[in-house]
Image (spheres, helix red, strand yellow):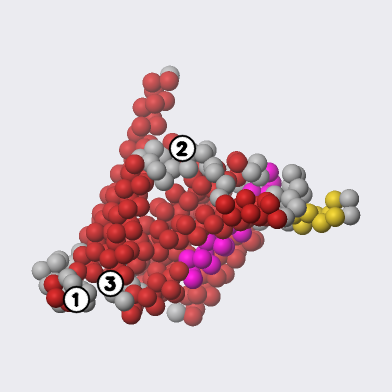
Amino acid sequence: MVITFIVLAVFFVVDLFVIGRRPHVPSTAECVRHILFFVVAALIFGGIMWWIAGSQPAMEFYSGWLTEYSLSIDNLFVFVIIMANFQVPKKIQKYVLSIGITIALILRGIFILIGAALLERFTWIFFIFGAFLLYTAIKVARGEDDDEEFHESKLIGVVRKFTKITNEYDGEKMRVVRNGAKYWTPLLIVFVTIGTTDLMFAFDSIPAIFGLTKDPFIVFTANVFALLGLQQLYFLLGTLLDKLVYLPVGLSIVLAFIGVKLIMEALHTNTLPFINGGHHIAWVPEIPSWLSLVIILVAIGGAALASVLKMRSMKQVEQ
């Protein structure tokens, strides 16, 4: 386990702060190679887990990784909007993404620890997680989760009110001196925005993966592999994200499925006195890991394929 964390830490640092910080806009071929490397690495990691621990943990990892990866792609929609809204120069977008993804990993790590501790003591929290995911799935399906227009939060308003912020960026600097006075650059607002956004996404992603596995090790490794290569995915799909019109549908199906699975798990291990007298409900079936993996693959894969087919049909109509 220690060796795994060390290797993943090296991957993460190299991905974001060595390769990811080179001052250039990556080509499509470079992005594809980089993403494929980490996809293959995740598949190999799952295979090693299968060989060492058996099929159950491996399928839980694959299901969790696919779910978190899909939710991370959804996160890119918001990153694109943030970059555009604050007019972040292209030459420092890699730096901003590196910090943003690091914040996401830290927040997810904290939520994983909290979630694992709570679930170990209070299994009825599955009811809350399940209901929350069903609510989120309905919002995503209705399009209420799409941030077509950016609206600054009250927190950003407070930051603007009590700090001196310049209107221009100065490379990667967050603090500059103008006419003898110290000012923050707009990077401060960008990082506050990304941080609060990552916090909201952690509320979605962590309950979702705990619905697939209760093993904190699998939860954390699935999240790390989902975030690896996300920077290159941003540059690869940045101009195409709005074309993935059916991705929200696929995500809503996955979230709704996991929400139902969580509620079924809560009923199966029920201890609440006002439900069945505090006894377990034995007739509630358990959904096997392989079925979860199949449903996630079909939902996300089907949404992606349908989006590609619609893109092609629209191009043919235009021609």
| Residue where numbered disc 1 is placed | 273
Vertical position of residue 215 compared to residue 241: above or below? below
Residue 285 screen position, x and y as percent? 15, 66
Q: Relative to 179, is 106 on the left or the right?
A: left
Q: Secondary structure at mark 2?
A: helix
Asked whether 156 or 172 is in front, the reply is 156
Quadrant containing the N terminus in the rendered view: bottom left
The tag earlier along the polypeptide, 2 or 1, is 2
Q: Residue at x 31, y 70 (%)?
A: 125
C-alpha span from label 2 to label 3: 38 Å
Asked whether 71 or 123 is in front, the reply is 123
Name the residue type under label 2. Asp
Count residues near mark 3 (Cα–Cα under 10 Å), then give few for <14, some for 14-19, many for 20+: some
Image-quadrant location for residue 306: top left
**Foreground tag (2 vs 3):** 3
Residue 290 screen position, x and y as percent? 24, 62
Callout count: 3
C-alpha span from label 2 to label 1: 48 Å
Name the residue type under label 1. Pro
C-alpha span from label 3 to label 1: 11 Å
Q: Relative to 144, is 156 on the left or the right?
A: right
Count residues near mark 1 (Cα–Cα under 10 Å), then give few for <14, some for 14-19, many for 20+: few
Q: Residue 242 got which mark?
A: 2
The tag earlier along the polypeptide, 2 or 3, is 3
Asked whether 55 or 103 is in front, the reply is 103
The tag earlier along the polypeptide, 3 or 1, is 3
Q: Residue at x 68, y 51 (%)?
A: 160
Identify the magenta region.
Answer: 89-110
| Residue where numbered disc 3 is placed | 124
